[in-house]
Amino acid sequence: MASTKKNFLSFWLFGKSAAGLSGGKKALFHLWNWLLPILAAAGTGLASLTLAYGRYERAVFNGYFSRPLIALLNLLPVIALFLILYSAIGRSWIAHLAASLLVLGLSAADYFMLLFRDDTLLFADIMDAATAMGVVGNYNLAVDRRLLVCILYLVISTVFLALFVRGKPRWPVRLSVGVLVLLFCAFPLRKTYLSNSIYEQKTQNFDHVNRWSATQAYLSRGFLYPFLHSVGEAFPTAPDGYSSEAAKSLLAPYADADIPEGQKVNVVTLMLEAFSDMSYWNIPGLSEEVYASYHALEAESVSGKLMDNIFAGGTTNTERCFLTGSGILDNYRKNVNSYVWYFRSQGYKTGGSHPCYNWFYNRRNVNSYLGFEDYYFLEDHYDAVSGGGIAFDNTFFPELTRLCLEDFKNGPSFSFNLSYQGHGPYDLETLWFGEWVDRLDYSETSWMIMNNYFGSVKDTSDRLAEMVDAFRDCGEPVVLVVFGDHKPWFGDANSVYHELGINMNTGTEEGFYNYYGTRWLIWANDEAKEALGNDFVGEGPALSPSFLMDYLFRLCGWKGSAWMQYTDTVMRALPVLTSNGFYVSWDGVFTTDPTPEQAKIISDFRIADFWYRRHFLYEDLTK
């Protein structure tokens, strides 16, 4: 009897296989040698989650388990990886160590990125290891308590498996398990992790983070799950007909052209949050004073319609299309071609301001990839200027004017700036800027929203006029570009638009302009007009954000970068080329069904754009 027990324990703990065991003993053998390693792998998944929330509050970690799907989607990859390795190797401790080193190594990398840069690790970062190592090299990587706990767990769990779970399941069993896991990963698991609907709708965990922060939205779902979801972003689909050779042939005729020394005027660009001229709708009861300052500025500028790709949100689409000249945005993880880099190549100082948080849309990191040398945010500048908190336009515009005037003394400079004041939703209980819309028969909610929005617009317009007056008299050549990023939020389900009877049906031409349209203007002071030989007055075409910088260069008489020279040929055919399938020709014809000639232009632009976004051309400026 004692011999039998000894035999069983020998197989149970140290045996090579279940051969010679029968019945319940064989079942216990498999339970011990499969269940314990799987639990150890799950423990590695839990260790990864302890690192996933970085420097944010622990309540984020607790949220992973109040939404069990998030926890499950973070644990399953570790278990699946372990099972695949275990099936191939047959030694639980080796498979566990290998799987855990990979998972915890990636988790630690993400953890350090959160600590040092408030950024997260995406799959695309793994594909650019040189850049990643360059980033890591700038920081002091110290092991803190959470990392130490993970290391201790890895050591203890591995040693336990090596000493007490040494059974080696037979090859046919391991093969069966391995094949089943691979099939599960290849089909249902893969589809689940790449699904945008599951990611966006079923794994929301925003109770303790800000949903508008790309970093916080990512870490709110753990680490392994969003990391694997980012695989889809790392391999964007090339447009039909794409090849590197085809793209190069489209761009081959062009080369960067220098801005003549005598024409290097200061360029200030300003994107106004949710700013839109709605006076052309003839809204009953709307005071003419709301847009008076803005219309006066348009009268001494070149201006036109800006046809955004977005509505009431998604600010960075307009912002980054304008800065890059690209029609489709990437999830920027390294230096990317932009007009900012071109300005730097021409000896311009590049910078700007945003009086809100630097983590908003990950601007702190992305702006450096776009080529900005200096950028002021709430945390490092405007918090002190405003006396604490986001700076609204009564603070933002005077401070921005002061910073620009200082830069002009050491010009030339290119400055890109974003306001915040117009950001919705708008207060439903307090009038922040007074009454600018008559009561009439509007619902209380609509009346409050309109007054707070239009009051903000008037305040912004008046502050803008003050800035222009300062530039008018500064004695340095200045060109100012102003545009709105998108139409404002006007009540849940667009309730105010509906109450006003505005056609927002994008299937119609009128609805398209109403839904996506804002305004742009380009103003120049006398010194800039003289230097550039242009009076900068008149009506310009409707433009996509991708082409606004191009049109500025045309007004200035500059050829610009090679990319801009190519896109100029596109703009002259289709100045409105949206990502939503809407197009407007140079002569103002709206269409959703482009002609064969227009279709070829669109196709070529997509091909060239795909290449341009993947081949950084200003490497010399980064050395």
Image (spheres, helix red, strand yellow):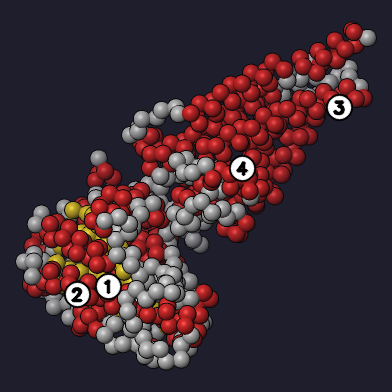
Closer to the chain start, of discs 1 and 2, is 1
- Residue at disc 1, secondary structure: helix
Which corner quadrant holds the N terminus? top right
| Residue labelled with disc 2 | 465
Q: Is residue 108 left or right of residue 554?
A: right
Q: Measuring from the top left, give residue 383's x and y in whole percent.
A: 28, 54
- Residue that appears at 37% across and 89% down: 438
| Residue labelled with disc 4 | 74
**Residue 245 falls in which quadrant of the image?**
bottom left
Location of residue 309 with respect to 104 vertically, above or below: below
Q: Measuring from the top left, give residue 190's x and y in whole percent.
A: 64, 48
- Residue that appears at 38% across and 42% down: 117
The span from disc 3 to disc 1 (Cα, nearest Å) is 74 Å
The span from disc 1 to disc 2 (Cα, nearest Å) is 9 Å
Which corner quadrant holds the C terminus? top left
Q: Residues within 10 Å of mark 3 (few under 14, many from 20)?
A: few
- Please tell me the numbered disc located at residue 27: 3
Q: Measuring from the top left, give residue 114's x and y in whole percent.
A: 43, 41
- Residue that appears at 64% across and 27% down: 96
Location of residue 465 with respect to 231 vertically, above or below: below
Q: Which amino acid type is shown beneath numbered disc 1? A: Thr
Number of numbered discs overlaid on the protein picture: 4
Q: Which amino acid type is shown beneath numbered disc 2? A: Ala
Q: Which amino acid type is shown beneath numbered disc 3? A: Ala
Residue furthest to the front in view is 430
Q: Is residue 531 left or right of residue 486?
A: left
- Please tell me the numbered disc located at residue 460: 1
- Residue at disc 4, secondary structure: helix
Q: Residues within 10 Å of mark 2 (few under 14, many from 20)?
A: some
